[in-house]
Amino acid sequence: DAGVIQSPRHEVTEMGQEVTLRCKPISGHNSLFWYRQTMMRGLELLIYFNNNVPIDDSGMPEDRFSAKMPNASFSTLKIQPSEPRDSAVYFCASQDSYSNQPQHFGDGTRLSIL
Amino acid sequence: SQKIEQNSEALNIQEGKTATLTCNYTNYSPAYLQWYRQDPGRGPVFLLLIRENEKEKRKERLKVTFDTTLKQSLFHITASQPADSATYLCALQNQGGKLIFGQGTELSVKP
């Protein structure tokens, strides 16, 4: 079975540029989560969707961050404009919340903003 | 504010011994507590979930305890192997499904 697929795996870009991270959840999962992981702050929830609808975006750091889920099989996290402090590993996870199964994580996008 | 603390120091043990990792929390009443394993360059992988009304859960060489009075969970790996070397994360979950993760404890099992 294909797991959660994230792209790109690595992204290096200059500050001020727009960055788009992509996620394909596991087929049949109705919940999708975006996390950010840094050494200082650990793994933090940014936003999550249920049935393609954003439920809680209280973890989104500022207006430069936005997330969309246009359909059940695709989500994006966008940073515009990017700043060096956005450098981190960004994870996407999906879950079948109806059966209260655990979250399944992708292998992340390592983002470096120069 | 809600706080989750795991052993900040890396844990080094000898193969065959039991590894015990600690997760303490404050200002939170979770419905569930979960443990995940994370290898370098990979996403976290779910290991075990324990409910607030359960005291202990086992899965093969893994055992988790959950003490809601002490606000603590212990995670044990018995007969540890070098392949168990990884970072282990505990996560608290309320009824809404949102997970809050600890910083993780790095475990190193030496042959």
Image (cartoon, coloured by chain):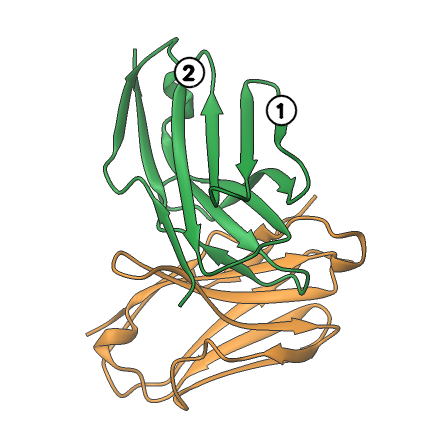
Asked if disc 1 and disc 2 are in contact, CB closer than 8 Å, the reply is no
Residue for point 59% across, 63% down: B98
Q: Nearer the viewer, residue B9 or A102?
A: B9
User: Which chain comes out orange in the rendered image?
Assistant: A
Dividing the picture into quadrants, the one containing residue B82 is top left
**Amino acid identity at mark 1:** Arg
Horizontal placement of B94 versus A91: left or right? right
Secondary structure type for disc 2: loop
The C terminus of chain B lies in quadrant: top left
Q: Give the color of chain B as drawn.
A: green
Residue that numbered label 1 is attached to: B58
Q: Provide residue B43's location: percent of width, then percent of height.
A: 47, 49
Report the chain holding disc 1: B
Horizontal placement of B24 versus A93: left or right? left
Q: Provide residue B2's location: percent of width, then percent of height.
A: 43, 63
**Amino acid identity at mark 2:** Ser
Q: Residues within 10 Å of mark 2 (few under 14, many from 20)?
A: many
Secondary structure type for disc 1: strand
Residue for point 19% across, 74% down: A114
Residue A111 visible in rendering = no
Q: Nearer the viewer, residue B72 or A76?
A: B72
Residue that numbered label 2 is attached to: B80
Horizontal placement of B33 versus A26: left or right? left
Q: Residues within 10 Å of mark 1 (few under 14, many from 20)?
A: some
Q: State the separation of the CA atoms marked 1 and 2.
A: 15 Å
Instruction: Look at the picture and state if B16 lies above or below B61.
Output: above
Report the chain holding disc 2: B
Dividing the picture into quadrants, the one containing residue A54 is bottom right
- In the image, which disc is placed on residue A106? none
